Image (cartoon, rainbow, N blue to C red):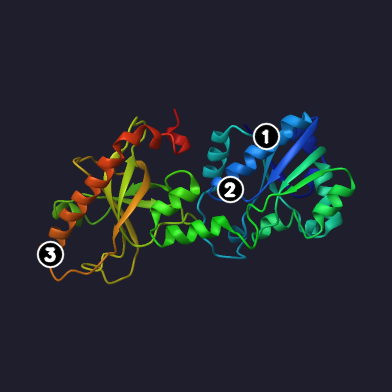
Amino acid sequence: MRVEYLIGSEANRGSQQMVGAGALAVAVSDWDGVHLGHVALARRTAEVAAKAGARAVALLPWPSPDAEGEKSVARLTTLEERIALLDALGCFEVLLVATAPAETLTVEAALAWWRGLGDVRALLGARSPADSVARLWPAGLAEAARSVGMSVEDAHVESVEDDLSGQIRALVEAGRMREATAALGYTYTVTGVVIGGDRRGRLLGFPTANLRLEPAKLTPGNGIYAAWVWLPGATSPWPAAVSIGVRPTFEQDGRRLIEAHLLDATIDLYGVELQVQFVEWLRAEERFDGVEALIEQMNKDRERAREILRAEAPARRLASQSWPAHSA
């Protein structure tokens, strides 16, 4: 899949050179999460393109509203993750990352923008609560597009009534990782670089990797999780118990941390970029009266994580293909 970037009004100045000549079937969404609804849209677009003798194109309006300061919404996927996930689907020839000009809020201007892309035979997608999509799909666009001969399929992938990405965000924030995995079609994953910590976990006998994450990326809700941790270049993941929260037994500043304890491993990971796949929530974080009680519970957490992940082991090969960076 080729990725092209289109800025503002450039759609009417050479965009056909970016997308390519010939008929086009274009799917538009903010693609946040590239969840099962998006997968259905992508596959439907590939079908429509094949029947029309057209090229399948994914259009991603960017930046998202939160990146423009209009909203503050943590996202399921970064731009780089969306690109990788869409590429892994194998449905599209081109991904067009486009910054829509403000004037496309009117139907006439939006239709002109779409026609500026070239011979758009089919337009698939839906209006979205995300302003970045609404700018290219204002109310009335479908009717106007049909009037000039475009086929339009309103897929309701990200409609106001059924915002699946929003529902998945709520599940992740609540730590309901099994349900989030079912809706996404893959295990929710975060990527972060290991940074220095106070080594308190090592002193307690539970060395942890403290992760620095992308600020706009959604982190699961506070608690303890069973997770897979991928190291660079690895062919299989490490089982881990991951803590997200403010460490109430020791800290009072409210600073939120994500710490991964690899089971049966002592590895210096400082400066290494890790991927963490959250399998299941184990318990809420809590404040303990003393270090001994904390260590006792951490041992229980470690064994519970081991038990859960051992049951997942037969599917480890499948898990390794659930995130593009580890696809075979």
Q: Indicate the position of residue 208 as horizontal and vertical percent values.
A: 24, 50
Q: How crowded is mark 3: few (under 14 residues within 10 Å), some or many (20 or more)?
A: few
Q: Which of marks 2 and 3 is nearer the N terminus?
A: 2
Q: Indicate the position of residue 83 as horizontal and vertical percent values.
A: 57, 40
Residue identified by numbered label 3: 293
Q: Do the residues labelled 2 and 1 touch (CB within 8 Å)?
A: no
| Quadrant of the rendering where the C terminus is positioned | top left
Q: Residues within 10 Å of mark 2 (few under 14, many from 20)?
A: some
Please tell me which residue is depicted at 18% across the width and 51% down the height of the picture: 206
Q: Quadrant of residue 235?
A: top left
Q: Residues within 10 Å of mark 1 (few under 14, many from 20)?
A: many
Q: How far apart are marks 2 and 1 (CA)?
A: 14 Å
- Left or right of 18, for residue 39: left
Please tell me which residue is depicted at 27% across the width and 46% down the height of the picture: 308
Name the amino acid, label 1. Answer: Ala
**Is residue 253 visible from the viewing direction of this image?**
yes
Q: Distance between the residues labelled 2 and 3?
A: 45 Å
Secondary structure beneath label 3: helix
- Outermost residue, right direction? 148
- Left or right of 290, for residue 136: right
Image label count: 3
Name the amino acid, label 2. Answer: Gly
Q: Are marks 2 and 3 in contact (CB under 8 Å)?
A: no
Secondary structure beneath label 2: helix
Residue identified by numbered label 2: 37
Name the amino acid, label 3. Answer: Ala
**Is residue 262 visible from the viewing direction of this image?**
no
Q: How far apart are marks 3 and 1 (CA)?
A: 56 Å
Foreground label between 3 and 1: 1
